[in-house]
Image (cartoon, rainbow, N blue to C red):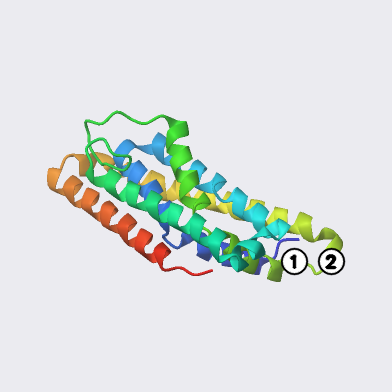
Amino acid sequence: MISTQFLLTALVVVLAPGTGVVYTLALGLGQGRRAALWAALGCTFGIVPHLMAATLGLAAVLHTSALLFNVVKYAGVAYLLWLAWGALKSGGALRVDPTRTADAGLRIARRGALINILNPKLSIFFLALLPPFLSGDPASATAEMILLGAVFMAMTFAVFCLYGFFAASVRTWLLASERAMAWLNRTFAAVFGGLALRLAFERA
């Protein structure tokens, strides 16, 4: 039985704007509803390795291994900086531009998945979030972790879609203003640059 407390906690976590939300918003604004859907899907599936790590206890290994943690962390930092550059570069991954060709859905999803996969703090986050909501029965702990993780992923996908569809709904208005597009591209670059900086200072 999934508790109301878990659902409320998960909802608050999912609603909080993070890297995946910003990515989904950028794709919704830059390429429309279809792209936002793929972005939400990719970000959601990027959670799977971390949920598996938390369920199997690998998150504890990541937490105690400074080398492994830093390898994943700095790969994530480099990736976020690449996305920041992609908001400024013509034809970049996050560039809001009415003349650009829409990216393939799987490419959008793959980028979104990598955003979460390359964030080592997520494994540790799930290791802390899920166990307090388990029944306490060791025999069913793994199944309960998987169920809670699946519910969290479903909520993530639904909320990210709402964010992305909202962004897509104002896309036409924004694309009509060169000033708005320039401001958006600089903002997305600054946000992803800031997220990269924050991740760089994270510790296991």
**Residue at disc 1, secondary structure:** loop
Task: Pick the residue in front: 117 or 45.
Answer: 117
Task: Pick the residue in front: 31 or 65.
Answer: 65
Residue 155: percent from left, percent from top: 56, 53
Task: Pick the residue in front: 200 or 173.
Answer: 200
- Locate the C terminus and report the quarter of the image it occupies: bottom right
Residue type marked 2: Asp
Residue type marked 1: Leu
Residue 37: percent from left, percent from top: 45, 39
* Residue ID at (25%, 41%): 96
Toward which corner of the image does residue 171 lie, by quadrant?
top left
Task: Pick the residue in front: 7 or 131.
Answer: 131
- Locate the N terminus and report the quarter of the image it occupies: bottom right
The correct choice, above or below, for 44 with respect to 128 in the image is above
* Residue ID at (67%, 58%): 58
Label 1: how many Cα within 10 Å (few below 14, some 14–19, many 20+):
some
Marks 1 and 2, Cα distance to the nearest angstrom?
A: 8 Å
Answer with left or right where residue 42 lies relative to residue 79: right
Q: Which residue is mark 2?
A: 137
* Residue ID at (31%, 43%): 94
> Residue 196, can we see it?
yes
Q: Are marks 1 and 2 in contact (CB under 8 Å)?
A: yes
* Residue ID at (45%, 44%): 112
Q: Residue furthest front?
A: 67
The correct choice, above or below, for 88 with respect to 53 in the image is above
Residue 143: percent from left, percent from top: 78, 54
Residue 46: percent from left, percent from top: 54, 47
Q: Which residue is mark 1?
A: 134
**Residue at disc 2, secondary structure:** loop
Q: Which mark is residue 148?
A: none
